[in-house]
Image (spheres, rainbow, N blue to C red):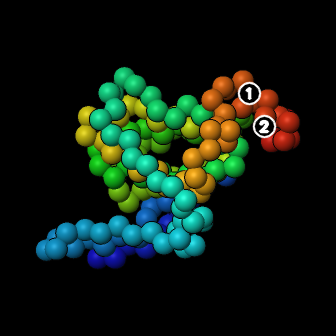
Amino acid sequence: MIHETSHDTCSVRGVRLYEMRHVIDHARGNLTVGEVGRELPFTPQRYFLTYAIPTEQTRGEHAHRLCSQFLVCVHGECHLVVDDGENREEFCLNRPTFGVLVPPMVWAVEHLHTPDSVLMVLASHPYEPSDYIRDYAEFLDGIRTRGAVS
């Protein structure tokens, strides 16, 4: 059985939720697929995986000035909080068919990891420390300066 990609928006500016194309094949196993330019709106320049994160720990807790990220929990489960300074939503990433696009200037936090969680992040830019905003007050100042929040 083939399931086509669908996507939805949320109240956080620019964040998109994706139910990825996937094939359910009880005999051979399942497959999830995404194509650059079709589901993924950027060409990844970097990827990373987070795993073995203690449940009480958080990851992320920052925004990017230029980099977009696409997050999929490929095993286990974790929660993703996205925040544009005005709206905040939380999602449970708990299957390899569900991905979230986090655009620049959106604060993101990953938490409540199960012991077996593996979070894959595709990034639109190479690692650049100056692209990170790690202070929430600085993030809010930055989006106010851009006119994103009234």
Residue 85 falls in image quadrant: top right
Q: Residue shown at 56%/38% (left/top)?
A: 108
The crowding category of the residue bearing disc 1, from other C-alpha atoms within 10 Å (few below 14, some 14 to 19, many at least 20), is few
Instruction: Tell me what residue is drawn at x 59 percent, y 57 percent.
Output: 124
Label 1 or label 2, whichever comes before in sequence order? 1
Q: Is residue 63 visible?
A: no
Quadrant location of residue 61? top right
The one nearer the camera, 83 or 48, is 48
Q: Position of residue 30 (x, y in %)?
A: 25, 68
Give the position of the C terminus as an image quadrant.
top right
Q: Is residue 57 visible?
A: yes
Between 73 and 27, the residue placed more toward the observer is: 73
Percent position of residue 44, x then y:
54, 61
Q: Nearer the viewer, mark 1 or mark 2?
A: 1
Circle 2 SS class: helix
Residue 50, percent across and down? 38, 41
Which mark, residue 22? none
Horizontal relation, residue 11 to residue 25: left or right? right
Report the amino acid beneath label 2: Ile
- Which three-letter amino acid code belongs to the residue tagged 1? Glu
Mark 1 lies on residue: 138
Q: Residue furthest bottom?
A: 1
- Residue at 16% across / 74% down in the picture? 28
How many angstroms separate mark 1 from mark 2 (CA)?
9 Å
Q: Is residue 113 left or right of residue 68?
A: left
Furthest residue in direction left, as rendered = 27
- Please give left or right for residue 14 compared with residue 60 in the image: right
Percent coordinates x, y for residue 145 in the rendering:
86, 36
Provide the secondary structure element on which disc 1 rests. Answer: helix
Say if 138 sits above or below 78 in the image. above
Mark 2 — residue? 143
